[in-house]
Image (spheres, rainbow, N blue to C red):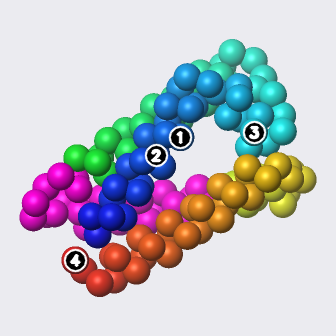
Protein backbone atom coordinates (compact mmCIF):
# COMPACT_ATOMS: atom_id res chain seq x y z
CA UNK A 1 0.00 0.00 0.00
CA UNK A 2 2.94 2.29 0.68
CA UNK A 3 4.04 2.27 -2.98
CA UNK A 4 0.49 3.16 -4.06
CA UNK A 5 0.46 6.12 -1.67
CA UNK A 6 3.87 7.31 -2.86
CA UNK A 7 2.87 7.04 -6.53
CA UNK A 8 -0.41 8.85 -5.85
CA UNK A 9 1.43 11.57 -3.94
CA UNK A 10 3.91 12.18 -6.75
CA UNK A 11 1.18 12.26 -9.42
CA UNK A 12 -1.17 14.56 -7.51
CA UNK A 13 1.55 16.88 -6.21
CA UNK A 14 2.81 17.29 -9.77
CA UNK A 15 -0.65 17.82 -11.25
CA UNK A 16 -1.58 20.23 -8.48
CA UNK A 17 1.57 22.30 -8.90
CA UNK A 18 1.10 22.31 -12.66
CA UNK A 19 -2.44 23.63 -12.38
CA UNK A 20 -1.45 26.18 -9.73
CA UNK A 21 1.64 27.52 -11.50
CA UNK A 22 0.97 26.87 -15.20
CA UNK A 23 -2.80 26.50 -15.57
CA UNK A 24 -2.98 27.69 -19.18
CA UNK A 25 -0.26 25.27 -20.29
CA UNK A 26 -1.76 22.27 -18.47
CA UNK A 27 -5.30 22.91 -19.70
CA UNK A 28 -4.05 23.45 -23.27
CA UNK A 29 -2.08 20.19 -23.15
CA UNK A 30 -5.13 18.30 -21.86
CA UNK A 31 -7.82 19.85 -24.02
CA UNK A 32 -6.18 21.68 -26.89
CA UNK A 33 -8.19 24.72 -25.85
CA UNK A 34 -7.21 27.87 -24.00
CA UNK A 35 -8.62 28.86 -20.63
CA UNK A 36 -11.45 31.37 -20.84
CA UNK A 37 -12.19 34.32 -18.57
CA UNK A 38 -10.50 34.95 -15.17
CA UNK A 39 -13.17 33.05 -13.17
CA UNK A 40 -12.25 29.90 -15.11
CA UNK A 41 -8.59 30.45 -14.29
CA UNK A 42 -9.52 30.77 -10.61
CA UNK A 43 -11.50 27.50 -10.76
CA UNK A 44 -8.60 25.69 -12.46
CA UNK A 45 -6.14 26.92 -9.84
CA UNK A 46 -8.58 25.94 -7.08
CA UNK A 47 -8.66 22.45 -8.57
CA UNK A 48 -4.86 22.49 -8.55
CA UNK A 49 -4.88 23.34 -4.86
CA UNK A 50 -7.24 20.42 -4.24
CA UNK A 51 -5.00 18.01 -6.16
CA UNK A 52 -1.97 19.29 -4.28
CA UNK A 53 -3.76 18.63 -0.98
CA UNK A 54 -4.54 15.05 -2.10
CA UNK A 55 -0.85 14.60 -2.80
CA UNK A 56 0.04 15.87 0.66
CA UNK A 57 -2.51 13.49 2.22
CA UNK A 58 -1.03 10.54 0.33
CA UNK A 59 2.55 11.50 1.20
CA UNK A 60 1.92 12.04 4.90
CA UNK A 61 -0.13 8.84 5.17
CA UNK A 62 2.64 6.71 3.70
CA UNK A 63 5.01 8.05 6.38
CA UNK A 64 2.84 6.50 9.12
CA UNK A 65 4.59 3.24 10.04
CA UNK A 66 1.31 1.52 10.94
CA UNK A 67 -0.61 2.96 7.96
CA UNK A 68 -3.74 3.39 10.09
CA UNK A 69 -5.19 6.09 7.86
CA UNK A 70 -4.11 4.39 4.64
CA UNK A 71 -7.41 2.61 3.94
CA UNK A 72 -9.34 5.88 4.22
CA UNK A 73 -6.90 7.71 1.96
CA UNK A 74 -6.86 4.87 -0.59
CA UNK A 75 -10.67 4.80 -0.55
CA UNK A 76 -10.70 8.56 -1.20
CA UNK A 77 -8.19 8.16 -4.02
CA UNK A 78 -10.31 5.35 -5.48
CA UNK A 79 -13.33 7.64 -5.63
CA UNK A 80 -11.24 10.50 -7.02
CA UNK A 81 -9.64 8.35 -9.74
CA UNK A 82 -13.02 6.97 -10.84
CA UNK A 83 -14.33 10.53 -11.09
CA UNK A 84 -11.24 11.88 -12.85
CA UNK A 85 -11.16 9.08 -15.43
CA UNK A 86 -14.90 9.50 -16.07
CA UNK A 87 -14.82 13.30 -16.42
CA UNK A 88 -11.79 13.23 -18.69
CA UNK A 89 -13.16 10.41 -20.86
CA UNK A 90 -16.50 12.23 -21.14
CA UNK A 91 -14.66 15.39 -22.22
CA UNK A 92 -12.91 13.43 -24.93
CA UNK A 93 -15.99 11.61 -26.17
CA UNK A 94 -18.79 14.16 -25.76
CA UNK A 95 -16.76 17.24 -26.66
CA UNK A 96 -14.47 15.69 -29.27
CA UNK A 97 -11.27 16.52 -27.45
CA UNK A 98 -8.50 14.32 -28.76
CA UNK A 99 -5.28 15.58 -27.21
CA UNK A 100 -2.83 12.75 -26.47
CA UNK A 101 -2.32 14.11 -22.93
CA UNK A 102 -6.07 13.85 -22.27
CA UNK A 103 -6.18 10.17 -23.20
CA UNK A 104 -2.93 9.51 -21.31
CA UNK A 105 -4.60 11.03 -18.23
CA UNK A 106 -7.67 8.81 -18.74
CA UNK A 107 -5.44 5.75 -18.91
CA UNK A 108 -3.41 6.86 -15.88
CA UNK A 109 -6.53 7.42 -13.76
CA UNK A 110 -7.99 4.09 -14.91
CA UNK A 111 -4.79 2.27 -13.89
CA UNK A 112 -4.76 4.11 -10.57
CA UNK A 113 -8.43 3.16 -10.05
CA UNK A 114 -7.60 -0.51 -10.50
CA UNK A 115 -4.55 -0.25 -8.23
CA UNK A 116 -6.57 1.49 -5.50
CA UNK A 117 -9.41 -1.04 -5.79
CA UNK A 118 -6.96 -3.93 -5.61
CA UNK A 119 -5.13 -2.56 -2.55
CA UNK A 120 -8.42 -1.65 -0.90
CA UNK A 121 -9.70 -5.21 -1.37
CA UNK A 122 -6.53 -6.72 0.13
CA UNK A 123 -7.07 -4.69 3.31
CA UNK A 124 -3.42 -3.96 4.02
- Which residues make up the magenta segment? 61-86
In terms of secondary structure, where does tag 2 sit? helix
Q: Verify CB contact (< 8 Å) between mark 3 and mark 1.
A: no
Residues at marks 3 and 2, CA–CA distance in whole angstroms: 17 Å
Q: Verify CB contact (< 8 Å) between mark 4 and mark 3.
A: no
Q: Is residue 26 left or right of residue 48?
A: right
Residues at marks 3 and 1, CA–CA distance in whole angstroms: 12 Å
Can you identify the residue that label 3 sits on?
A: 29
Q: Give the mark nearer the N terminus: 3 vs 2.
A: 2
Can you identify the residue that label 1 sits on?
A: 15
Count residues near mark 1 (Cα–Cα under 10 Å), then give few for <14, some for 14-19, many for 20+: many
In terms of secondary structure, where does tag 3 sit? helix
Q: Verify CB contact (< 8 Å) between mark 2 and mark 4.
A: no
Q: Residue at x 27, y 64 (%)?
A: 2
In terms of secondary structure, where does tag 4 sit? loop
Quadrant containing the N terminus is bottom left
Amino acid sequence: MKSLLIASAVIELGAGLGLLCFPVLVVTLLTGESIGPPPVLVAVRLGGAGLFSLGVACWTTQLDKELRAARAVVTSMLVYNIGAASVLAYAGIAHGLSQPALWAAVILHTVMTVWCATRRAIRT
